[in-house]
Amino acid sequence: MELLILLKAFILGLVEGATEFLPVSSTGHLIIVGDILNFTDERSKVFKIVIQLGAILAIMWEYRERLIHTVANLHQKSAQLFVLNIGIAFIPAAVLGVLFHGDIKDLLFNPFTVSIALIVGGFAILAIERWAPPARTPTVDDMTPLQALKIGLAQSVALIPGVSRAGATILGGVVFGLSRQAATQFSFFLAIPIMFAATGYDLFKSWDLLSPADVPIFAVGFITAFFAALVAVKTLLRYVAHHDFRIFAWYRIIFGLVVLAYYW
């Protein structure tokens, strides 16, 4: 039985790391795969929170030089603007998440909601790819605070499971004039404070559910999520340099329809 649980932890860690930074909704995939694996008890909810930290550490490792450089040069206007933009984009989802955290978890964390959000989000990506304005902001260093605020508002839509935080921020960035590379990188950077905040808040509220006996399970999921996210981030950056996001749109639509039919 313990081996089976460790295998489930490995699979879920792989799913988390592979999907967290793609516009396909990691939360939606975790809900669906967890349901298929029958890993849906209270312990599983804490587990899914903890393994997100593995994915976030992958981003911090990938961009460690940029993060260290920013901290070391906060006296420079470019570094101050970068931090300001991250802070501005962080606020909308953080505020709404605190206000509606309980309602979202109780009402929307189910396969039906996820499948609908996946399908609708897929069509939204197709629409954005068709009508998005030309890019006028080539890098994250060229962003304005107003663009950051707009991306932050777009990110708040991803509080609905299945929408995808990465998808909302990346495609929101494209809509508001960022290049694909800049929108993708900003989505990665923005993930650090928003996911640390969300994970910390969830852990604080679920602290009584933690048990020392769960350490091996959590460790397997955490480490797997870290390495899977590292591969996914590198792959996505190479992909967006030469392609659009339509493939993710069709994946969302097909996967959402399959899930909807399965649970129907």
Image (cartoon, rainbow, N blue to C red):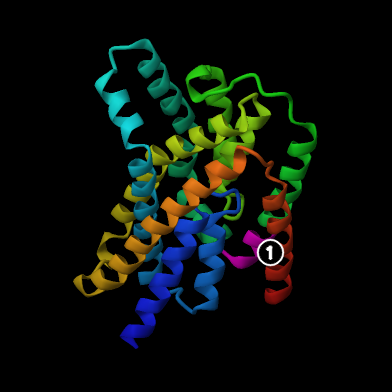
* Position of residue 98 measured from the top left corner of the image (x, y, whole percent): 43, 43
Q: Quadrant of residue 90?
A: top left
Q: Label the magenta part by its dominant secondary structure.
A: helix
* Position of residue 121 measured from the top left corner of the image (x, y, whole percent): 69, 49
Tell me: residue 39, above or below residue 46: below
Q: Residues within 10 Å of mark 1 (few under 14, many from 20)?
A: some
Tell me: 90 left or right of 31.
left
Q: Quadrant of residue 130?
A: top right
Tell me: residue 56, above or below residue 254: above
- Disc 1 on helix, strand or loop? helix
Residue at the image position 26 percent from the left and 72 percent from the top: 216
Quarter placement of the N terminus: bottom left
* Position of residue 37 measured from the top left corner of the image (x, y, whole percent): 50, 78
As rendered, which of 20 and 92 lies closer to the eye?
20
Tell me: 228 left or right of 23.
left
Residue at the image position 45 percent from the left and 57 percent from the top: 17
**Amino acid under disc 1:** Phe
Q: Residue furthest bottom?
A: 1
Q: Which residue is mark 1?
A: 255
Residue at the image position 57 percent from the left and 54 percent from the top: 25
Q: Which residues are magenta?
A: 110-116
